[in-house]
Image (spheres, rainbow, N blue to C red):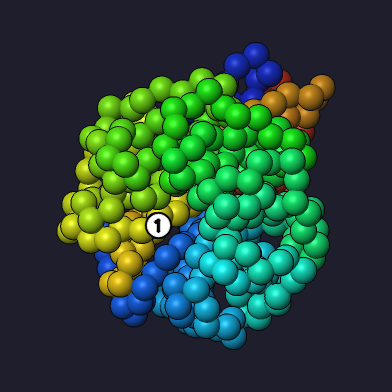
């Protein structure tokens, strides 16, 4: 019998309650992706659409969470970085000593744009795919506000930039450089400020959707660092001192995924408070990505394959009151859920909320108008 997964929320404008806490096996599976020199991977919010680039090869995409992979018409070059919008339709890929390409149809076709030929190291995208940021090894930082049609360099210093990450709205950015400091921006890259972070922590960075929770790794056998205030202060986590090659975060910053090169994959469910090594063989783990809820994960092993892991999500409903209406929201889940309502928990007359949810950044949102003082809402899996 298939288990039904439910989460309840009561709209009473004086409180809220929710009940759910599911656990599931955390098994990684090697996908059908060919053995390539995989270099970077990105995921849509629900984890269904993936894009991975090959250094010295093509670009591959998947529309079924890594079940199948297809190469497309992107040129063969030294692809080094890739990023995705929340819905997985707008993609951006950058090559080392090459161009930047964008796609507006989930990678079916790709277009070269006005970005100069540089040693592009990393790219990041806002949730809607309109604001992009790209960093150059030994050069400036470039940004775009029109999905990559045009690019502008800004006031960031010319450093050995290696990584960059973005908040969902594209306003808060964090960038790291090899052997140097971490910089942050709160205005979509117009200006940058050096963060109070240890040096040599610019190999990989990631950000929560609101840009407050940041994670930074070093490739010099050191622990992972986190920040809960947009980079103002940083704390070392209790992780082994390894060569951390990549890190990814859920939208709320609670679920983290980190790759230790030639060692293992580690995960955290409490914003880096504790970490667990996953049951995976030692491989040249080079890049990782996560769905918005952190329940669909993907990891690239350079020169070998692509691995994925899926666990059962337990989305948490949030409520904001506005007069007689209420805005109910939840992080885009990695499996289908239906919002239902009921005016009395004493009966079983749950009905689907007919208003389709809108998508803002990495959240589903529905405005409801309860007809009496109290109303109950839940998410139910089909």
Please give left or right for residue 285 compared with residue 115 in the image. Answer: left
**Label 1: how many Cα within 10 Å (few below 14, some 14–19, many 20+):** many
Q: Position of residue 195 (x, y in %)?
A: 57, 27
Evaluate whether residue 37 shows in this view: yes
Residue pointed to by mark 1? 287
Q: Position of residue 155 (x, y in %)?
A: 74, 41
Of 15 and 147, the residue lying toward us: 147
Q: Is residue 370 above or below residue 130?
A: above
Please give left or right for residue 70 compared with residue 370 in the image. Answer: left
Q: Residue at the location (40% across, 57% down)?
A: 287
Q: Is residue 232 above or below residue 370?
A: above
Which quadrant holds residue 304? bottom left
The residue most toward the bottom is: 73
Evaluate whether residue 365 shows in this view: no
Q: Position of residue 260 (x, y in %)?
A: 28, 49
Q: Is residue 378 above or below residue 80?
A: above
Q: Is residue 61 above or below residue 92?
A: below
Please give left or right for residue 109 compared with residue 249 in the image. Answer: right
Q: Position of residue 70 (x, y in %)?
A: 48, 81
Quadrant into which the N terminus falls: bottom left
């Amino acid at each position: 019998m298939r288990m039904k997964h439910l989460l309840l929320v009561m709209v009473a404008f004086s409180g809220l309650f929710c009940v759910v806490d599911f656990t599931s096996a955390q098994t990684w599976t090697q996908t059908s992706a060919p053995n390539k020199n995989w270099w970077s991977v990105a995921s849509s919010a629900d984890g269904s659409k993936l894009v991975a680039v090959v250094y010295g090869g093509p670009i591959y995409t998947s529309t079924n969470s890594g079940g199948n992979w297809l190469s497309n018409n992107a040129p063969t070059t030294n692809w080094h970085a890739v990023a995705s919008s929340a819905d997985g339709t707008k993609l951006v890929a950058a090559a080392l000593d090459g161009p930047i390409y964008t796609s507006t149809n989930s990678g079916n076709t790709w277009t070269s744009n006005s970005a100069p030929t540089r040693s592009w190291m990393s790219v990041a995208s806002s949730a809607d795919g309109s604001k992009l940021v790209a960093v150059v090894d030994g050069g400036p930082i470039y940004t775009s506000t029109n999905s990559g049609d045009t690019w502008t360099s800004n006031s960031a210093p010319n450093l050995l930039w290696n990584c960059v990450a973005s908040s969902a709205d594209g306003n808060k950015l964090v960038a790291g450089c090899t052997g140097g400091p971490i910089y942050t921006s709160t205005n979509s890259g117009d200006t940058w400020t050096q963060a109070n972070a240890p040096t040599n922590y610019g190999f990989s960075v990631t950000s929560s959707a609101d840009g407050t929770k940041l994670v930074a790794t070093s490739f010099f056998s050191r622990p992972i660092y986190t920040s809960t205030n947009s980079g103002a202060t940083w704390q070392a986590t209790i992780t082994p001192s390894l060569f951390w090659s990549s890190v990814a975060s859920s939208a709320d910053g609670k679920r983290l995924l980190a790759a230790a090169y030639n060692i293992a994959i580690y995960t955290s469910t409490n914003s880096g408070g504790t970490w667990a090594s996953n049951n995976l063989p030692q491989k040249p783990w080079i890049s990782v990505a996560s769905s918005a809820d952190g329940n669909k994960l993907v990891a690239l092993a350079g020169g070998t394959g692509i691995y994925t892991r899926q666990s059962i999500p337990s989305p948490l409903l949030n409520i904001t009151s506005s007069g007689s209406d209420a805005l109910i929201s939840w992080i885009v889940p990695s499996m289908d859920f239906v919002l239902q309502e009921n005016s009395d928990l004493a009966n079983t007359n749950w009905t689907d909320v007919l208003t389709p949810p809108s998508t803002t950044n990495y959240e589903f949102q529905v405005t409801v108008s309860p007809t009496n003082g109290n109303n109950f809402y839940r998410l139910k899996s089909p």
